[in-house]
Image: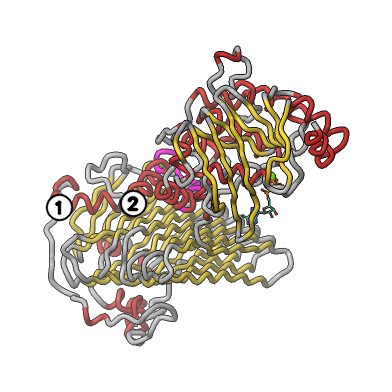
Amino acid sequence: MNKRDIIIERAKRAREKKAGLGDDINLERYNTAGSEHDALKSLAEVPQEHKQSLLRAGIEPSESGRSGSFLLQDRSVVFSRVKSPGLELMSTTEALKRHEWLATDYLWKAIPVDMDKYTADVELDETNGYFIRAKANSKVTIPVQACLFITTDKTGQKVHNIIIAEENSELHIITGCSVAHAVQSALHLGVSEFYVKRGAKITFTMIHNWSEGVEVRPRTAVVIEDDGTFISNYILMTPVKSLQTYPTAYCEGKNARANFQSIIYASGNARIDMGSRAVLKGERSRAEIISRVLATDNAEVIARGEVIGEGANASGHIECRGLMLSDNAAITSIPELKAVRKDLDLSHEAAVGKIAEEAILYLMARGLSEEEATSVIIRGFLNVDITGLPEALARETKKMLDMSLEKVM
Amino acid sequence: MLEIENLTVEVAGKEILRDLYLNIERGEVHVLFGPNGCGKTTLLLTILGFPAYKVKSGSIKFKGVDITNLPTNERVKLGMGVSFQHPPQIRGVTLGDMVNIAQGRSEAAIDEGVIELAARLNIPYEFLSRDVNLGFSGGEVKRSEILQLMAQSPEFIMFDEPDSGVDVGNIELIGGIMSELLDRNKLPSKRVRAGLIITHSGFIMRYIKADRAHVMLEGSIACSGMPDEITKNIMEVGFEKCVEKCKVK
Ligand SMILES: Nc1ncnc2c1ncn2[C@@H]1O[C@H](COP(=O)(O)OP(=O)(O)O)[C@@H](O)[C@H]1O
Ligand SMILES: [Mg+2]
């Protein structure tokens, strides 16, 4: 049996393996075939009715200010174009044909294929996704954009992404996940494997723009070598049926660094179980996990964070803040620290509360109405310092956050 | 400008202010003395309309309008402003944001003029991007409050203990700016702004001139008079005796 056959065999055995966290999803409720879409010559050809959905997920249909663009519609790759010579961008399927080493050295190396039924399904079902690679020493400060878009009702979108930043390269990615208005129910399974080589840096800004009927199970892992940096900014502002994800960064190398920032506005009947984990193996490796969770309506959120310290002088911090806007919502905050040696510095702070009335009154004493004051406080609460992004991208990310906030408030 | 009549106020079911009268005319600055816990801050927050302060009887009029039942922001819109004794911390909302809000600006960028005002208060530009009151020292809180008032520029200003926790050099600075905000440097006939300064120490009164002084005891104004005289009496014999002296007259 060759390597790929072994993978498939393992996947088959994990077909029924329930995930440890989150509600179990009946995968048979979603279509695994159909809804093929024709390729586009440019993103500008995206029909007007869909453009707004793309914009809301941070995707620029004009492709301006982007070093590359990728669009997966339902299960078809409809667009992929790269503008920067330092970059490779194509569908994972295409990349596996082109690079033999991809299957042997990267595919399912960061995430076990038999982790649960979702990873297994991504392997066994027809899958697409993006492959992005920054070549050694090339610093591409203009972001690449990738959009995973669902436009057909009952679609089960299965995605496998592989992202590699070769030695001393720099790569900035905006991934927007979006869904068209007409879609009542859909499933998104997304496997993303990141490899940050020696001295390289990846920033990954992901905006989820789902709707009430979408079930989402991303599976993400990041392997970081010596002096490598991975920064993730995750923004979820729209309703979702259920979402469970626990991205994990393995800081393998010396001075490897991982930052996770998550901003979640949970509304409607959303059931969200979301965390970030860092395994600090390298000497002096470090991680920071920051989350802001706002829960309203009947939303239920579990906000997790875990730092496992194994390497000499490793350090990590978890900061989890929740704000409750409804008596029918719930936030559970679960920060975990594990230390296995004595020279570590691990800490966490967690706080869940309501909007302080005295803060509202303070703002009213400066002339704001109660509603305006509430909105200023919520914005402030969600305003995490987004560091490590190139200036233009940082500004844009702020704008995207503002735009999503505008919609919910 | 401000007329308070027969005011009785309850906080958390407890009567704190009793039958209080106070009248401040346009162009005037009054100072309110009184021991800790006598109800000075309660009076200020009642004038401002904070909901915990329940008016049981009496009325408050501001610029001829009965504001007894108006929400805080409506009162502020009519032209009142306040420097708080203990303002809350708000995470993610910067001093710069507060200044913009006080100015009624909706942009995030900070007005050039405000940066100059900040410099006058020894507030460096970077300080404007700090979360308001989070980790501020006592003196920084006071200067941040005054900066917000400078941006707002209200017609009637209440200062709650602007001198507590402030070092001597900064008290002089704050007193100077308060004088400006309250038209103290103009001829009496040209003064349009009015103010109420609360101080239990009285330090700030060395740097700003008031027209009238009051002493509050147990929730009522127990005596009123000329600021110099009252300040002197308080310093010499304390609040209670000062009030007795007042009554004898
Ligand atoms: N929000 C409140 N809740 C309960 N008691 C209060 C509140 N505000 C003031 N008080 C009480 O009212 C009294 C007067 O307080 P305050 O007006 O702050 O006095 P001062 O400013 O003169 O020192 C005190 O006994 C204080 O404990
Ligand atoms: Mg007080």
Is residue B36 among the parts visible in the rendering?
yes
Chain to which the residue tagged by mark 1 belongs: A
Q: Quadrant of the N terminus of chain A?
A: bottom left
Relative to the observer, which residue lies in front, A187 or A170? A187
Chain to which the residue tagged by mark 2 belongs: A
Q: Which residue is the extreme one toward the right?
A: B236
Relative to the observer, which residue lies in front, A165 or A235? A235
Residue A392 falls inside the magenta stretch: yes
Q: Residue A103: name its quadrant.
A: bottom left
Q: Residue B179: name its quadrant.
A: top right
Secondary structure mostly taken by the magenta-highlighted segment of the chain: loop
Tag 1: amino acid: Glu
Residue A105 falls inside the magenta stretch: no
Tag 2: amino acid: Ser
> Residue B111's x, y, as percent?
47, 27
Q: Which residue is mark 1?
A: A49
- In what quadrant does ligand 2 lie? top right
Q: Secondary structure at mark 2?
A: helix
The numbered disc on residue A404 is 2
Which region of the structure is painted magenta? A382-393
Nearer the observer: mark 2 or 1; the answer is 2
